[in-house]
Image (cartoon, rainbow, N blue to C red):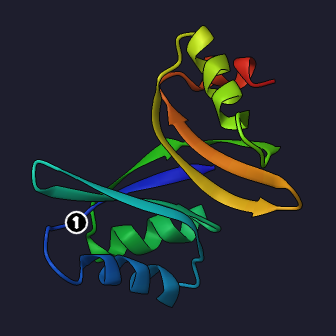
Amino acid sequence: MKEFDVYVQNKPGELAKVCELLGANGVNIKAISSERTNDRPMIRIVTDDEATAKSALARSGIRYDLRDVISVRMPDRPGELGKVARKLARVMVNVDSIYILGKEGGATEIAFTVDNALKAHEALK
C-alpha cells in the first residue's frame, strides 16, 4: 500500500481540486489527512487504485511523493495502539505519519509511514 503526499497551495479549493480529480478518475480515497508546515499544505492520501491515482495526479501537474504504508489490524480497545507503538519503539523505528483506515467487527486498521519499513514489518509480526 502507498501513501500519496500531495503538495498543494495554501488557498481555498485545493482539497476540492485533488479530491474531485481522483473521483473523476474512479479512484476512491481510503484514508486522508492533511498538515501545514511553513505555510505549505500537504494532503496525505491512501487510495484503492494507486496506478490510476498516480496517472491522474501526474497528468494534472499536481506534485506528490509516494511512501510505503504499513497497516496493522488490532483489537478496538484501550491500550492496543500503545502496544503497537511500543513494539516499533523497541526496534528504534520512528513513525512519520499515522491514521485510521477503518473499523470493523471489533477491530481497527491503522496505517503508518515509518523511517524503516523492514524493521517495522519484523517488529509487528
Choose top left, top right, bottom left or bottom right for residue 42.
bottom left
Residue 113 vs 37, above or below: the answer is above
- Mark 1 burial class by Cα count in 10 Å: few <14, some 14-19, many 20+: some
Residue 75 in percent (x, y) is at: 82, 44
Residue 106 in percent (x, y) is at: 86, 56
In the rendered image, the residue lying farthest to the front is 78
Mark 1 residue type: Val
Choose top left, top right, bottom left or bottom right for residue 85.
top right
Q: Nearer the viewer, residue 87 or 60?
A: 87
Residue at the image point whose x is 48% and y is 64% from the top:
32
Residue at the image point whose x is 64% and y is 49% from the top:
1
In the rendered image, the residue lying farthest to the left is 39
Residue at the image point whose x is 41% and y is 86% from the top:
20
In the drawing, does residue 123 fall left or right of residue 46? right
Please give the residue where the numbered disc 1 appears in the rendered image: 8
Q: Nearer the viewer, residue 111 or 47?
A: 111
Residue 61 vs 7, above or below: the answer is below
Residue 125 in percent (x, y) is at: 81, 24
Residue 104 vs 116, above or below: the answer is below
In the drawing, does residue 103 fall left or right of residue 43? right
Q: Secondary structure at mark 1?
A: loop
Residue 14 vs 51, above or below: the answer is below
In the rendered image, the residue lying farthest to the right is 105
In the drawing, does residue 81 fall left or right of residue 96? right
